Image (cartoon, rainbow, N blue to C red):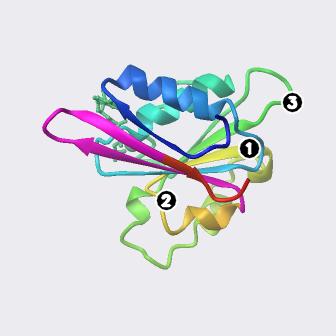
Amino acid sequence: MSRSAGTAELATAEDTIALGATLGAGLRAGDVVVLSGPLGAGKTVLAKGIAQAMDVDGPVVSPTFVLARVHRARQPDRPAMVHVDMYRLLDHPGADLLGELDALDLDTDLDDAVVVVEWGEGLAERLSEHHLDIRIERNTETDTRTVIWQWSAP
Ligand SMILES: Nc1ncnc2c1ncn2[C@@H]1O[C@H](COP(=O)(O)OP(=O)(O)OP(=O)(O)O)[C@@H](O)[C@H]1O
Ligand SMILES: [Mg+2]
């Protein structure tokens, strides 16, 4: 199901990591993953699963106080994962994500990496034709998560 669309009901954070790993296994250099959903939905947890499948250096933690972190592949010739959190840019609707990332001097060409963006809806899609949109909803009564994902292009 690597490039398919789908939906899942996830009871635990472990389930979310597993879904992230399944989706992460289908990612290639140049792909962008746009993670959306409210505070505490599980965006960072899902990014951990993606990192697991991509076999990149950890730990994947919330990058809230930095715009982005680079997690390098452990295997040669595999893409790095660039983990971006745009929460602080939400107050700046005209923000130029690419410009901000360039300014960080990440020492990684974004075309050679998989870019995983929390709070990126509306901005991060511009980074690539091929983006995977993942939306996580928190069901407050049951504390489970509903995840809906879809690729923008095959
Ligand atoms: N099914 C689930 N999937 C994901 N996280 C879950 C689930 N059930 C409980 N949790 C808990 O919810 C929290 C999700 O936190 P996480 O940091 O991933 O959210 P986030 O969407 O990245 O938040 P933020 O908007 O602050 O970045 C974790 O503490 C996790 O253990
Ligand atoms: Mg987060």
Q: Can you say whether 80 is above or below 105 in the image?
A: above
Q: Which residue is mark 1?
A: 113
Q: Which residue is mark 2?
A: 120
User: Where does the image place residue 125, in percent across and percent down from the top left?
Assistant: 60, 63
The residue depicted at 46 percent of the width and 34 percent of the height is 46
Judged by its main secondary structure, the magenta piece is strand
Please report contact status of discs 1 and 3: CB closer than 8 Å, yes or no.
no
The residue depicted at 48 percent of the width and 62 percent of the height is 121
Ligand 1 picture quarter: top left
Q: Which residue is mark 3?
A: 77
Looking at the rendered structure, the kind of residue marked 3 is: Asp
Whether ligand 2 has any atom under 8 Å from the Cβ at mark 2 is answered as: no
Mark 1 / mark 2, whichever is N-terminal: 1
Q: CA distance from mark 1 to mark 3?
A: 11 Å
Q: CA distance from mark 1 to mark 2?
A: 17 Å
Q: Which residues are magenta?
A: 129-148
Q: Residues within 10 Å of mark 2 (few under 14, many from 20)?
A: many
Q: Could you say whether the residue bearing mark 2 is in a helix, strand or loop?
A: loop
| The quarter of the displayed image where residue 22 is located | top right
Q: Nearer the viewer, residue 45 or 91?
A: 45
User: Where does the image place residue 100, in percent across and percent down from the top left?
Assistant: 59, 64
119 left or right, relative to 70: left
Q: Is residue 131 magenta?
A: yes
Q: Could you say whether the residue bearing mark 3 is in a helix, strand or loop?
A: loop
Q: CA distance from mark 3 to mark 2?
A: 27 Å
Task: Point out the residue furthest to the left here.
Answer: 141
Q: Can you say whether 95 is above or below 152 in the image?
A: below
